[in-house]
Amino acid sequence: MPINIAETAQRLIDARAAGSPVDRLITDDMGPTTEDAFRVQQELVRRAVEGGDAVAGFKLGNIAKAMQDKFGVDEPDYGYILASQFYPENLAIEESEFIEPFIELEPGFVLKKDLCGKHVNAADVIAATDFVIPSLEIIDSRIRNWNISLFDTLADNGSIGGILIGGQPRKLSEVNLADTVGVIEYDGREVARGNTSAVYGNPISAIAWLVRRISAYGVGLKAGQFILPGSCLAAEKMIPGTSITGRFEGWGEISFDYTTAK
């Protein structure tokens, strides 16, 4: 039987609201396609916006090999970023906000021009970028134990959970995104390390890839939007009662406390 777009979207909404994941979402007998899964994602976003939220940007995920190996997928995913998914840095986030979250470190891009079309390249991304900023993405799956396929994570809006951005914006000319080391620390102890070169060689190229891919759905990126190109390191499972910091060497950092439920 084919994917029921509205029903699948509702299952994800219910899982998020209850804090209880579904065992299976999209199965082989549905004959799934990426187009079907993306339609589920768009239905989720449509309902969120109808309820008062707003589209704030777009994300690319699992483009680094370390991330594909971590979650057993062999293609990148992508999804919309909503205004409600941003959290302030240096404040507490309670574990009840998520189901089974992991943390990633990425350079976030803010656009000054639209980016769309199947022929976008790295030069177009450079011309369209206003500034970049250190960012943490919390990923969280509404499918139990992260037992996901590409179709599952696409339907689940790229498994997005939340976003934190730091206060150290830079022009692209002021950073070297082809070779910047990033680390994540728990209570001051390093738990993950990577390099922005792992993000498709350069996160700029990753965003060009994203724009070309979503152009197949008639979707583009807009001026003023916040764009995430993917993590520079393997995502680390979040541990309640931990102070979490993401840092790009020579650039800046973001921190927050991940607290136990009250």
Image: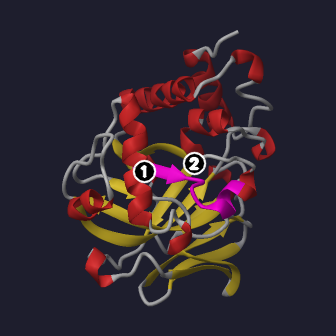
The residue where tag 2 is placed is: 76
Query: Residue shown at 75%/46% (left/top)?
Result: 146
- In the visual, does 40 lie left or right of 184? left
- In the visual, does 192 lie left or right of 5? right
Q: Between 36 and 206, which is closer to the camera in this rendering?
A: 206
**Residue 127 percent across, percent down from the top left:** 21, 62
Note whether residue 40 is visible: yes
- In the visual, does 233 lie left or right of 255? right
**Residue 199 percent across, percent down from the top left:** 52, 65
Q: Between 146 and 77, which is closer to the camera in this rendering?
A: 77
Query: Residue shown at 60%/45% (left/top)?
Result: 159
- Look at the image and give the residue range highlighted in magenta: 58-68
Residue type beneath disc 2: Pro
Query: Residue shown at 42%/51% (left/top)?
Result: 209
Extreme top residue here?
1
Query: N-terminal of the two: label 2 or label 1?
Result: 2
Magenta span contains residue 66:
yes
Q: Is residue 205 above or below residue 26?
A: below
Residue 209 disc label: 1
Note whether residue 82 is visible: no
Query: Residue shown at 51%/26% (left/top)?
Result: 35
Q: In the rendered structure, are the residues bearing label 2 and label 1 in contact, judged by CB atoms less than 8 Å apart?
A: yes
**Residue 46 percent across, percent down from the top left:** 41, 27
Place residue 188 in its image quadrant.
bottom right
Tell me the CA gap for discs 2 and 1.
Answer: 10 Å
Q: How many discs appear?
A: 2
